[in-house]
Image (cartoon, rainbow, N blue to C red):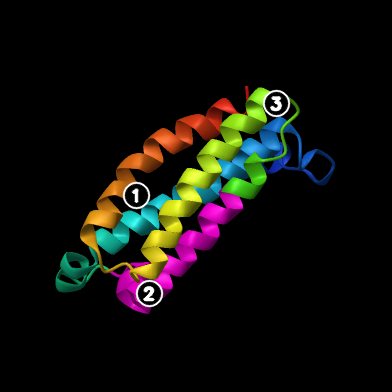
Amino acid sequence: MAPLTSAAAISSDSLFTSVGRLVIALFFGFIGREIWMDIRDADSDAQSGIITVPVKYGKRMASRTAAVSMIGMSVSSLFCKSKMSLTMAVVASTWIVGRAWQIVQTEGLDPQVLKRAVEESKIAFLFMLGSFL
């Protein structure tokens, strides 16, 4: 039933309503963060035979894919009605895209940058969620 209700929330006439934007932002944000966490675990996943994006396509491609996902999250959260909401969305977007850029620059090979990005993304997501209030 969940796929049907999610599809109804993002119907073509309500794509940029608050709920539609929230669903899109959460989708892209969670996908990006999960890929970041997979990059951190890529070596142990490869040894265990677990196929993830960084294991199959490499950390460089995974870091770029996560960055595109985070940009998608950021763009979908920037269509706000109030100045306060826009401010929170800009703070979250700048923060998360900045971290994504650092990961792309290091090609996902710096564990400290990845760790900070994963941890700080929790706070950035809160700011992003606050922009929908």
- What count of labels does the image hold? 3
Q: Which secondary structure class fits the magenta region best?
A: helix
Q: Is tag 2's residue or tag 1's residue first in the polypeptide sequence?
A: 2
Quarter of the image for residue 113 reads bottom left
Residue nearest the viewer, comparing 84 with 52? 84
Q: Mark 3 points at which residue?
A: 83
The quadrant in which the N terminus is found is top right
In magenta stretch: residue 76:
no
Q: Nearer the viewer, mark 3 or mark 2?
A: 3
The region drawn magenta spans: 51-73
- Number of other residues with Cα within 10 Å of mark 3, as a class: few under 14, some 14 to 19, many 20 or more: few
Tell me if I can see residue 1 in this picture: no
Magenta stretch holds residue 64 = yes
Question: Residue at the spot x=59%, y=39% of the render?
Answer: 90
Which kind of residue does numbered mark 3 sit on?
Lys
Marks 2 and 1, how far apart in space?
A: 16 Å
Nearer to the camera, 42 or 84: 84
Q: Could you tell me which secondary element the residue under label 1 belongs to?
A: helix
Quarter of the image where one finds residue 58: bottom left
On the image, numbered disc 2 is attached to which residue? Answer: 60
Regarding mark 3 in the picture, which secondary structure is present there?
Answer: helix
Distance between the Cα atoms at labels 3 and 2? 37 Å
